Image: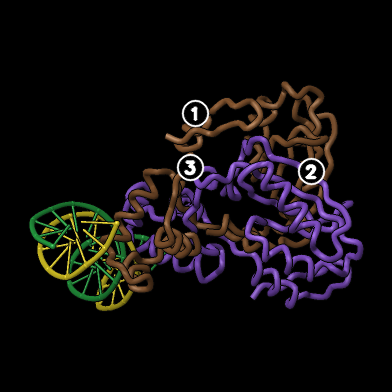
Chain colours: A brown, B purple, C yellow, D green
Amino acid sequence: MISILNQTTGIRFKYQAMKINSLLIEIDGIDKEILRYLMDDARKPILQIANKIGISGAAIHQRLKKLETSGVISGSKFTVNPKVLGYNTMAFIGVYLDKASRNSEAVKDLKKIPEVLECHYTTGNWSVLIKIICRDNEHLMQLLNTKIQAIEGVSRTETFISLDQQIDRQIQL
Amino acid sequence: MISILNQTTGIRFKYQAMKINSLLIEIDGIDKEILRYLMDDARKPILQIANKIGISGAAIHQRLKKLETSGVISGSKFTVNPKVLGYNTMAFIGVYLDKASRNSEAVKDLKKIPEVLECHYTTGNWSVLIKIICRDNEHLMQLLNTKIQAIEGVSRTETFISLDQQIDRQIQL
DNA sequence: ATTGAAATATGTTCGTA
DNA sequence: TACGAACATATTTCAAT
């Protein structure tokens, strides 16, 4: 067990140290290498990864199981290209709620809008910042006027259209 | 080949129709159902999906191939949980560039910062809006002071810390 | 933690409707 | 498009180190 000494007060925070230990998972270089392959392609065969890294497939399999049970891997997803389906306009919308306490109800309503991809409870002027995908500007306008502004407690919105997403990636290992 | 008749001019726009055809991919209900399963879990066995939907595995396989070659599916990814690795602070940063023409160089520099997950060229006050993942507030501060502000052309930034990501999903089919 | 080999499960192709 | 059966790959387990 690690304890941290506060230099000013002289008090050791053992509780704090324990909390940090229970949350933080350590992964080594081989784990990182395995994950780098699978973060790029979830269906990459274990044996191909094994050959590239130079350990057996069984070892990779065992490490992956550990990474799953420890929660490092939270799942796998097929990624769909919205543009091919006709969704060309991405936008960020800063939403003002007249009472911050309305947040949880507002989020429930936002979840019902399929075009809403992300919702963040943020510091700063807005109550929440949302990311949204629409077919075009007209669709975006309709959403703002008939869905977002219609949510109880929403007083005002500020919209930023993403003309080009220049970076899109996960955490780098 | 489809041609579109302009009622006013009487001219048929074959070229336009072809262009629309090449961009917009139509997918039917079965495709959507297959994708819904795989967007949730890229490693879900085809035969399990086949049983749930009520068609053969070979048919699913054939449809998936079509969805891949048409570009509807852009890949598959293992998703890593940043919190478990000690990355607890997500933030959005609005970046002002003193010249809009600096954008492409600035993006190159931003790509070199591993903590930057997204970068959007947006309408509105900022030149770009970036999404970033950090270990904690101190790490965020260091990044702002030593990496982001150090990029040539960056005049000012506005930071919004995400205290809680309440929605995180792909386009809904 | 790692291995190779065996056992099981899954993906892919192909002839046919 | 869809099917089922045959075939090819991938995964998981296991005994041993």
- Name the residue located 67 percent from the left edge and 51 percent from the top edge: B132
Mark 3, secondary structure of its residue: loop
The answer to whether the residues at label 1 and label 3 have Cβ atoms under 8 Å apart is no
Q: How much space separates mark 2 and mark 1, taking CA atoms?
A: 54 Å
Q: Earlier in the sequence, mark 2 or mark 3?
A: 3
Q: Return the residue at label 3.
A: A24
Q: Are marks 2 and 3 in contact (CB under 8 Å)?
A: no
Mark 1 or 3, closer to the camera: 1
Query: Hey, what amino acid is under mark 2?
Result: Gln
Q: Quarter holding the N terminus of chain A? A: top left
Report how far apart the C-alphas of labels 2 and 3 lie in the structure: 44 Å
Q: Can you tell which of label 2 and label 3 is closer to the viewer? A: 3
Tell me residue B166's x, y (percent): 62, 36
**Residue depicted at x 44% and y 64%:** A33
Of callouts 2 and 1, which one flags the residue occurring earlier in the amino acid sequence? 1
- In the picture, measured across the screen, residue B53 lies left or right of residue B85, that is left
Coordinates of residue B136 in the picture (x, y in percent) = 64, 42
Instruction: Give the CA separation, mark 1 to mark 3.
Output: 16 Å
Which residue is label 2 attached to? A142
Q: Chain of mark 2?
A: A
Label 2's element?
A: helix
The amino acid type found where label 1 is placed reads Lys
Q: Nearer the viewer, mark 2 or mark 1?
A: 1
In the drawing, what numbered circle is on residue A14?
A: 1
Residue B55 visible within the image: no
**Number of numbered markers:** 3
* Front-most of residues D6 and B151: B151
Q: Are marks 2 and 1 on the same chain?
A: yes
Q: What amino acid is found at the position of numbered circle 3 in the picture?
A: Leu
